[in-house]
Image (tube, helix red, strand yellow):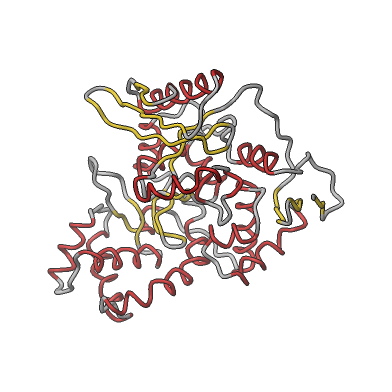
Amino acid sequence: MVADTRGKSCHRVSSTSDIVRVRLHNHALHKPRFDDPHAAVAWLGAVQAQDYPAAKWALGMRVRNATDALIEKAMNDGSILRTHVMRPTWHFVSPRDIRWMLELTAPRVRSILSHYDRTLGLTAKTLTRCAAVIARALEGGRHLTRDELAGRLERARIEARGQRLARIVMHSELNGLICSGPRRGKQFTYALLDERVPRARSIDRDEALAMLARRYFVSHGPAQVKDFTWWSGLTVKDATAALDAVKPELIAKTVDGKTYWFAPARVPKPATSVAMLLSIYDEYTIAYKDRSALGGGEFRNELLRMGNALTSVLTIDGLIAGTWKRTLLEGAVDVAIRPLRRLTAGEKDAVAAAGRRYGRFLGTPVTMSGRGV
């Protein structure tokens, strides 16, 4: 049963398959439509990025003619930043958004961290001392790795190892002191946010809530309020208030008793099957509390048994159809496909096309292996 809670006309959304089709369009996965990585990040609001190679590929699928080197350059020149901002985990964010987003989400993240911080002996006084040491170490445009920051903290007689070091650095990110600097080879560095990103005007909390909700439902919709609550890390009260602020700009549809919100848009239907090699951390897969629209229900137990071994999923027309794994070889990359069902000839062609696309992104020959290829 489907109910339209608004009188506004819109394209048809009356089933789970319609939800998937609209999401693929809004995620810019049907067809890349951004000219640079910053535009893709700004559109999505934040892009989960703890798995750095997978996060670069997530942007690569949304940017025209993208390569791994193009995304790497955007990180190094600061047109996109990688920092802790929500839930907590790493995200790519736009320099234009980082300050207001941190002001909105950081208090909630700090609250989540507080219990374990106490077990690590990280009091407010200790974190203030750490911040002063880190600020001095980075001032003047210096970019240091986490281990180098640990050395500076140890010289100041502050224990900084393991999880304690990770939390110290995370709090400096959440407080808007530091953000990602350019990579040094394969190592990540940190920079002072004030030296990396120009100051921007402050916005009040209500405006920030509305901005975050607008960004999410326009780029990730159709989505439920509980999906936005999960993605943002906000309380249910704040997430509901944020959605309420932008409801006049959105359409609501109720499908199978669930209310989905999204922005009106013309959504073309692809003429042929589209396969995608996605990370489980791609915004298309991770940004929803309710992931039932991805399908795969009949394979749920098999996927759960994989546990931490499940890092990537193969989707066909937006639905889970298998898993994949990349193996770096000398001068090439092997992509091993493990379908969860028998693929049609057209679907096999789509999977092969996805592999070629991944190879172009990496700038490396890709071989495809596994059942059904």
What residue is at 50 percent from the left and 45 percent from the top? Answer: 41
Nearer to me, 254 or 51: 254
What residue is at 51 percent from the left and 35 percent from the top? Answer: 321
Nearer to me, 131 or 281: 281
Q: Is residue 117 above or below residue 41?
A: below
Q: Quadrant of residue 25?
A: top right
Nearer to me, 136 or 80: 80
What residue is at 24 percent from the left and 42 percent from the top? Answer: 186
Q: Is residue 95 above or below residue 104?
A: above
Residue 78 coordinates in the image, percent (x, y): 39, 45
Residue 365 coordinates in the image, percent (x, y): 33, 20
Residue 13 coordinates in the image, percent (x, y): 75, 43
Whether residue 348 sits left or right of residue 214 in the image: it is left
Q: Quadrant of residue 16?
A: top right
Residue 141 coordinates in the image, percent (x, y): 28, 53
Whether residue 282 sits left or right of residue 1 in the image: it is left
Whether residue 202 sits left or right of residue 322 in the image: it is right
Quarter of the image containing the C terminus? Answer: top left
Whether residue 204 sits left or right of residue 304 in the image: it is right
